[in-house]
Amino acid sequence: MLQQQLHIKIIEKPCRQIMLCAAFFKLLVISLFVFSCTTEVDINWKVESQKYVVNCLLTPDEPMKLYAFTTTPILDDTTFFADGLDVEIYKNENLVWTGSGTGNGEYPIPVYAEAGAKFKIIVIDKNGFAVSARDTIPLHIYISNVTYLFPVYEDIYGSKFGQVSLSFQDDAKVKNYYEIVILGKDSSINQTFNISSRVITLDNENDPNSPGTILFTDELFNGQQLDLNIFVNSYNTPIIVLKNVSHTYYEYRKSTNIHFYNQNVERYDVFSMFKGDPVELYSNVSNGLGIFAGYTQDIKECTLIKN
């Protein structure tokens, strides 16, 4: 009997040591986790004063319209309209219009942009503080030919795609920036397309944050005719908008495309969730933020070719 009790004591002693070591290890890990989660970090948070945000896109096809806001705190989703401002419009350095808004940050301007002209805007508040911006309206570039061959292929989901064949001549005398928009019959933007060429390669079929347009420069075809084949998911004959945009417009749209791509929508793995860095949107507004940029455009409906 004594031997049996002694035998039991010899077995129990190391078990208690192991259990005590395991408990101590768990307590150590929990303590480290808790203290690491409650460490205080001082952040040098700089609160900036409000700035005016002015947005206005200029095209000869419609009168100007300016939108004015003020910036909001980072944790506030309220929209602050900037009303009661005085607006001045200059064409080739000559004052052509002065006026004010209609409320809700809207400032209709009965002035049409002119291709090749230089425009400047000055916005002044009741305290005499002014923001300004300027841009030159590009010349027109016209579509020489555009057809739609349908259907061409069917994707894995059963959607049928057609082929837009587009041609236009670039102007060799100036640096040109282009944007192509594909519209449906109801003027909605078709965002499901793909293109592969020497100028640009883009596939929006599986992109949750599609830019919706095709943005590129004439760097690879300066002074030449460009022929593009764009494959579009559209059962109806598309309408093609070819925009010749200013450098200011191009830089702004390029920054917004990157911004929307980095919004982490519908990304299913940890590597894609944190893929992009914060992007500062391009602005050409002095003493404020926003965009004042011009473009010309040519709009044509495709000629349908049944396959």
Image (spheres, helix red, strand yellow):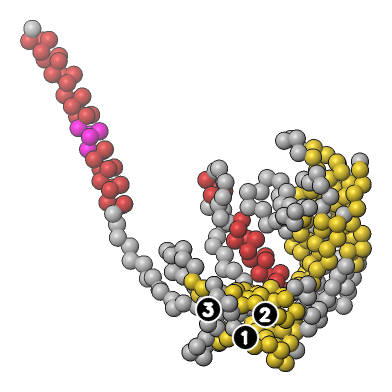
Residue 95 to residue 49: above or below:
below
Q: Report helix, strand or loop for mark 1.
A: strand
* Residue 99 tag number: 1
The residue that label 2 is drawn on is 109
Looking at the image, tell me whether mark 3 or mark 1 is earlier in sequence order: 3
Report the amino acid beneath label 3.
Answer: Asp
Spatial CA distance of label 1 from label 2 is: 8 Å
Main structural element of the magenta stretch: helix, strand or loop? Answer: helix
Any mark on residue 83, and which?
Answer: 3
Query: Which of the marked residues, 3 or 2, is nearer the chain's N terminus?
Result: 3
140 and 27: which is toward the camera: 140
Q: Which amino acid is tagged 2?
A: Ile
Q: Residue at x 72, y 81 (%)?
A: 111
Q: Is residue 18 shown in magenta? A: no
Residue at coordinates 44% horizontally, 76% vertically from top-left?
A: 48
Q: Is residue 94 left or right of residue 170?
A: left
> Which residue type carries mark 1?
Gly
Q: Whole-percent x and y of residue 162?
A: 83, 45
Which quarter of the image is occupied by the C terminus? top right
Which one is in front, 62 or 277? Answer: 62
Q: The N terminus appears in which quarter of the rendering? A: top left
Q: Is 239 on the left or on the right of 131, as rendered?
A: right
In terms of secondary structure, where does tag 3 sit? loop
